[in-house]
Image (cartoon, rainbow, N blue to C red):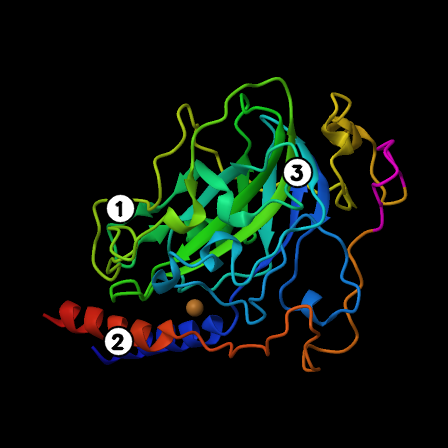
Amino acid sequence: MPSFVSKTLISALAGAASVAAHGHVKNFVINGLSYQAYDPTVFPYMQNPPIVAGWTSANTDNGFVGPEDYSNPDIICHKSATNAKGHAVIKAGDSVYIQWDTWPESHHGPVIDYLASCGSAGCETVDKAQLEFFKIAEAGLIDGSQAPGKWAADQLIAQNNSWLVTIPENIKPGFYVLRHEIIALHSAGQTNGAQNYPVCINLEVTGGGSDLPSGVKGTELYKPTDPGILINIYQPLSSYTIPGPALMPGAKPVTQRTSAIIGSTTAITGTATAAPAAPTSTAAATTTTSANANPIPTTTLRTSTIAPQPTAAPTQTPTSRVGQPPRPTRCPGLDNLKRARRHARDLAAH
Ligand SMILES: [Cu+2]
């Protein structure tokens, strides 16, 4: 018995350590070419942050949006999110490999992906409140036989903190916001205890498809009482209801795998590439590598690699770009997590 207790204590301490390190998406890869994402822990402190395809957001502490804010616009693309000024081009049927910098082991839960059409004006100016998201992929509980279960988020951790999303092959060409999200359920047994970590990326989808499924507004995706949101995972689970609207018709499960990087590139700006000549990004992937090559004929493509990190740590005064002081990095769910683990231990003792 003492050994069991100490093991539990060790795992709780390990959880406490990892909990300080919530993650964010650091880059994404399309056909071997890596694009830098929006870094909420660095870009707000830069004078001239790079133009990226990832939406700007104010989660400087790598924090989350909770169920009490499901009807607040913050749930759409994270806190105080504003449009990305660039986008990446992808052919329908191709995949985006989304790389988080880290993910805490304790933060079990589903991984969900949506698209929303931005219309012909592109996603760089669209009103996020008007976006209607349809679900293109979802993964939740993989094995619930032993609490707290094996979840999609655990699979994400196991493959280098990354997740592969395939753009449906028959989707209508155009500009879309890809909304990628992890929902952490370690405190979800309590009302408003779930933690949503959404991130938005602008894509231009090319190809010859015609599908444009109907969607729902970001502020209508979830309710705090959804069975997949208000749930105690510290018990064996035989099933799990992934939150949000139904998967789009014909959606296929994505076999998770890692994705090689052969080079890096930067976001495209403007809507000029909407012409049929657009699939240049896939042509780019067939070129041999090298950040110096400029395989895409449009002049707006910049080929510098990952932007330099600022020399000053994010301890300086935040710029007006975000205008909010960094929030504390402590995970509010930690106390609940400890309580839930204690509860699970008490149950096991019977
Ligand atoms: Cu947390």
Earlier-in-chain disc, 1 versus 3: 3
> Distance from label 1 to label 3 (Cα)?
36 Å
Q: Residue at x 76, y 31 (%)?
A: 273
Amino acid type at image mark 1: Tyr
Residue 315 magenta: no
Q: Main secondary structure of the magenta part?
A: loop
> Distance from label 2 to label 3 (Cα)?
47 Å
Per the rendered image, the range of residues in magenta is 293-304
**Residue 47 placed where, x, y %?**
79, 69
Q: Quadrant of residue 301?
A: top right
Q: Mark 1 CB in 8 Å range of ligand 1?
A: no
Q: Secondary structure at mark 2?
A: helix
Residue 303 magenta: yes
Label placed on residue 122: 3
Label 2 crowd bin: few (<14), some (14–19), many (20+), radius 10 Å? few
Earlier-in-chain disc, 1 versus 2: 1
Whether the residues at callouts 1 and 2 have beta carbons within 8 Å, the answer is no
Looking at the image, the residue that sits furthest to the left is 350
